[in-house]
Image: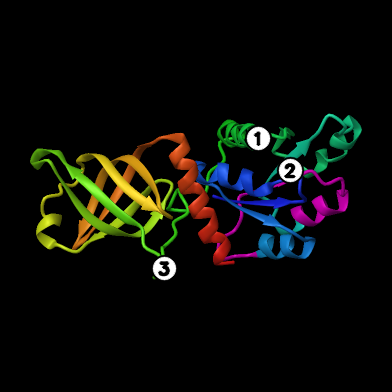
Amino acid sequence: MKMLFYEHFLNNMSDLTIDLIPMGLECIDCLSQDEFFNCLKSSDSPATIMMTGTKEIGLFKQIREISPSINIFYVVKNTTKTDLIKSFAPFCITAIINFTESSVHMADEIVRAIVSHNISTKDKRVHIRVRPIEPEIITSAVCIKEINRFIKGKVIDISAGGCAIKFDNHEEVSLLSPKTVYDPLLLKIDGTGIKALATLVAIHNNAAGFHFDNVEPVQMRRLANYIYRKISENK
């Protein structure tokens, strides 16, 4: 699900973007009004939500003209006047998000608003997927407990929800079984280890797709940081 940010309401917007990656949100921080409207008009991957704390009534008029169905999340601070919020009523604000300096708390409130308003997207993939590009390598090791052995490979793409791994040895791939839970699946990203409980979803030739069933929060944050960096590199 794509979400547009317009106007900086946090000192470090990247923290909020990273916190929302595991929730399945791809956030774009628009640095100018032109960039915001270009993203809003994009037909390739339209945004489902936009979030702002702007006081410009004219902006909301333009948003509704361009994208009548987009969900608008409005950020309010203690200093935000009630009369200002009431003036936005004709533009159908979807949710009010209370400002806090904690990106974690704001991310939680955003997700609660999405759930309470039953906001969904037509995107088939829940999470943003990125690919390591050579010479960058993400190594992996999958534990097969029945034979007390790890089989090793390289990650060909990864998201907060899972990864695809290519194995060099076809015989080792034959040891894997779809729908089996593997504990642990180990990854090494930028020299840092990440441990996951993962279910094997599918096998194709020497590649296998895994769904992450559980990743510790600190390690998920490391993975989200990596995904954010890759997205930023591709802009």
Name which residue type carries label 3: Ile
Confirm or deny contact between disc 2 and disc 1 (CB under 8 A): yes
Residue 21 x %, y %? 52, 46
Q: Is residue 5 magenta?
A: no
* Of the pair 106 and 90, the residue shown nearer to us: 106
Provide the residue designation for mark 2. 10
Q: Which residue is rendered at x = 43% and y = 53% of the image?
A: 124
Q: CA distance from mark 2 to mark 1?
A: 10 Å
Where residue 104 sits, quadrant-wise, is: top right
Residues in magenta? 42-64
Residue annotated with mark 1:
106
Q: Which of the colour schemes (rainbow, by chain, secondary structure, one colour) is used?
A: rainbow
Determine whether the residue tagged by mark 3 lies in a helix, strand or loop: loop
Badge 1 marks a residue whose secondary structure is helix
Q: Position of 200 compared to 123: left or right?
A: left
Earlier residue among tags 2 and 1:
2
Dot 2 alpha-carbon crowd within 10 angstroms: few under 14, some 14 to 19, many 20 or more? some
User: 61 or 59: which is nearer to us?
Assistant: 59
Q: Residue at x 39, y 55 (%)?
A: 158
